[in-house]
Image: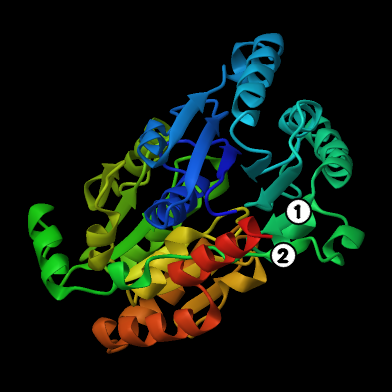
Amino acid sequence: MKDEQVVILGSFNTNNGITSFVKQNYSQLKKQGWQFHFINIANAKPARELASLGHYSEVKQLKLGPVKHVLDLARVLRRNRKFSSVIHMHLDSLHNFLPLLIAKFVGYKRIIVHAHSDQRGQYSWKKEVAQKMGMKICAQTATDFIACSQNAADFFYPKNIQQNDSFKIILNSAALNKFQYSEDANLKRRAELNISKTTIVVGHCGRFNRQKNHSFVLRSFAKFHQMVPDSKLVLVGNGEDFVKIKDLAQKLGIGKSTIFTGYIDNVAEVQNMFDIFILPSLYEGLSLSLLENSANGTQCLLSDQQTKESYFLDSTYKLSIKDGAEQIWADKMFELVQQDLDKKLQSVKNIEQLEEMGFSEKKSVASLIELYEK
């Protein structure tokens, strides 16, 4: 099937995990001769850079009106059906199940659904009903059922689907060597941000939204900063809560100790500064930022709400995010900075272990090729 083309649909925003997964893996597939038609149904800040990887179309956003969205989605899906009978949908939920129904209606022979998130317990009752309906429709319309983790699979697919040969977990991955620790990059980025080489840097990478729990990040760091005044918090990303979180940093008295980088392209270099990476997310499929920072040799603190595949290394720590748990996180950070840790050595060790576990880009690309060549 290598000479054929594949239609790729998803909500591809400029800086979400699904977009990162697609850009990373499909750039490698393109080099091997694969051709893709991307259909973007994002409701905000669509990742138009995907046009560099193949043909690219945007669907009128759902927030502009369901009728316009449905008609445009049907038009784009029908047009792309001329190029391929295979469509791969990269999704973070199933409450918008319209792409599944329309893809089936316009004649796609293989409908591959790829679960990238676990949002159980986070929905309003209306979205919960829509998600359950989407699960039933997915089971009836899709031909292949993929997930990035077991939690994501449980959010998308009933147990009977997971027992079929058509179900498979393809772990999220990273170009691990790209994120190997560099002392030169660490010192360079610190100098650019006027951060001393002895200052403890706590980092977070992610979209500023409810899921990423930035308010918990700030409150935890505020307590840690009282214990270690020579410390900085670096927040990478943007999003709808950006201004609110900046205001909260000021209210907590850590405004001068918090650096907001916004969206940046050189995340790999900036992560070299981090002594500790914290990810107190309310839910995750399998965080790409976690993989990247682990490859960088950073000590990583995670919420206990994430998929079991996330707690994979001895430099990864699982902590509660219940009310009042910020002190627990601050104490753990304080404990870690008292240790004489060799980040360069930890980076080499972690990359070796991550490759053995199947988190390498080479492994995920091979899994996608195997999927498409079925």
Residue 348 in the image: state x and y as whole percent.
32, 85
Disc 2 secondary structure class: strand
Q: Earlier in the sequence, mark 2 or mark 1?
A: 1
Residue highlighted by disc 1? 144
Residue 317 at what x, y percent from top left? 52, 76
Q: Amino acid at mark 1?
A: Asp
Above or below, comparing residue 362 to residue 254 in the picture: below
Q: Residue at x 46, y 30 (%)?
A: 56
| The one of 187 and 161 positioned closer to us in this rendering | 161
The residue singled out by tag 2 in the image is: 168
Frontmost residue, 275 versus 82: 82
Q: Are marks 2 and 1 in contact (CB under 8 Å)?
A: yes
Residue 270 x %, y %: 24, 58
Measured in 3D between alpha carbons, the distance from the residue under mark 2 to the one under mark 1, in whole angstroms, is 8 Å
At horizontal 40% and vertical 42% (from top left) the residue drawn is 53
Dot 1 alpha-carbon crowd within 10 angstroms: few under 14, some 14 to 19, many 20 or more: many
Looking at the image, residue 312 lies above or below residue 35: below
**Is residue 219 visible in this depiction of the protein?**
no
Disc 2 crowd rating (10 Å Cα; few below 14, some 14-19, many 20+) is many
